Image (spheres, helix red, strand yellow):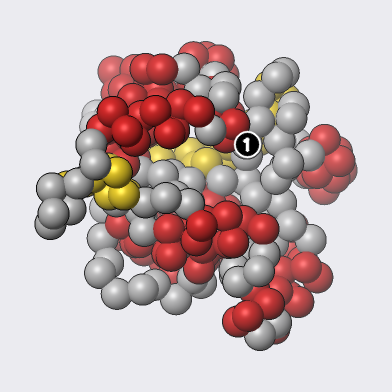
Amino acid sequence: MSTQALVFAHANGFTPGAYASLLNPLRTRFDVRAPALLPLRRQAMPSGDWAEIAADLASTVDAAPQPVVGVGHSLGAVALLMLAAQRPQRFSRLVLIEPVAMPAWACWLLRLAPAGVRERGPLARASRRREARWPGFDEAWAQARARRWFAGVADEVLHDVLSDGLQPAADGSLQLRFDPAWEARLYEQPVSLWPLLARPLPPMALLYGEHSRLFRAADAARWQRLRPQDTVQRFATAGHLLPLEQPQAVLASLRALLQAA
């Protein structure tokens, strides 16, 4: 019997290699497939439509000989959920880590808003303002290590984030592989996960951080009301970067969830 495929979808602004501490130990049991999402492979600016990300993941999911385990973080979690809502038979289970939870009305209003209004959203604005090029790795490391965003990320994991997330520029400097302009475009057109939960879906588990600002305790309670059959786990002290802040705890949870499946 062939090894079951586990398809991992990364977060907006990150790359697959950032999750090495989480994914590499899973390779002993699963055929781990962690594709680079569309913005990492396309030279032209993507539309920002999350449906485009979900559709692109379909080729990886469909290439597996049997239903896959889908694991995603943030944007990647929502994109896998969107795909599973369209073709649930292709998934044996979903584990969604810190999916972005926005009200459907807010996503609708944001999509209707003029481009200038969407660009002023806090996440999109922060992405566009972020430095994207450094003279060398040491300078990139020093700046990343000083950011509050990465305060809970251990040195070895941050090294993975930067090692896979940087690439040489024409002038010999290092630049982000995930263009901040692409990242911002995706933040401008979010999808609400809530309507998707009413669709036929495979068995699911939800993992979220206690201090996350993108998936809160109230969102977890709402999820449990809508889908009481799902496993919902809260990770103390973690934020939205849960799989990078606590990769070993998330790994243990994944192993338990997938062993029980």
Instruction: From the viewer's perspective, tell me whether residue 53 is left or right of residue 169.
Output: right
Task: In this rendered view, identify the residue nearer to me: 261 or 255.
Answer: 255
Q: Is residue 111 left or right of residue 2?
A: right
Which is more toward the observer, 222 or 17? 17
Q: Residue at x 82, y 35 (%)?
A: 217
The residue sitting at 60% across, 82% down in the picture is: 115
Locate residue 160, reporting x and y percent.
33, 28
* Mark 1, secondary structure of its residue: loop
Q: Nearer the viewer, residue 174 or 154?
A: 174
Which residue is pictured at 19% across the width and 46% down the height? 173
Count of residue discs: 1
Q: Tell me, yes or no, if residue 13 can be seen here.
A: yes
Name the residue at 65% across, 50% down.
Answer: 100
Image location of residue 73, percent across then percent down: 52, 41
Q: Please say if 139 is above or below 236.
A: below
Quadrant that contains the C terminus:
top right
Q: Is residue 174 above or below residue 25?
A: below
Report which quarter residue 189 is drawn in. Answer: bottom right
- CA neighbours of label 1 inside 10 A, class few (<14), some (14 to 19), many (20+): many
Tag 1 residue: 240
Q: Residue 218 or 227: which is nearer the viewer?
A: 218
Q: In which image quadrant can residue 1 be found?
A: top left
Compared to residue 204, the image places residue 80 above or below, namely below
User: What amino acid is labelled 1 in the image?
Assistant: His
Residue 183, x across and y down, in percent = 47, 59
User: From the viewer's perspective, is 253 left or right of 108?
Assistant: left
Query: Residue 194 is drawn in which quadrant?
Result: bottom right
- Residue 13 appears at what percent x and percent y? 44, 50
Whether residue 160 is visible here, answered yes or no, is no
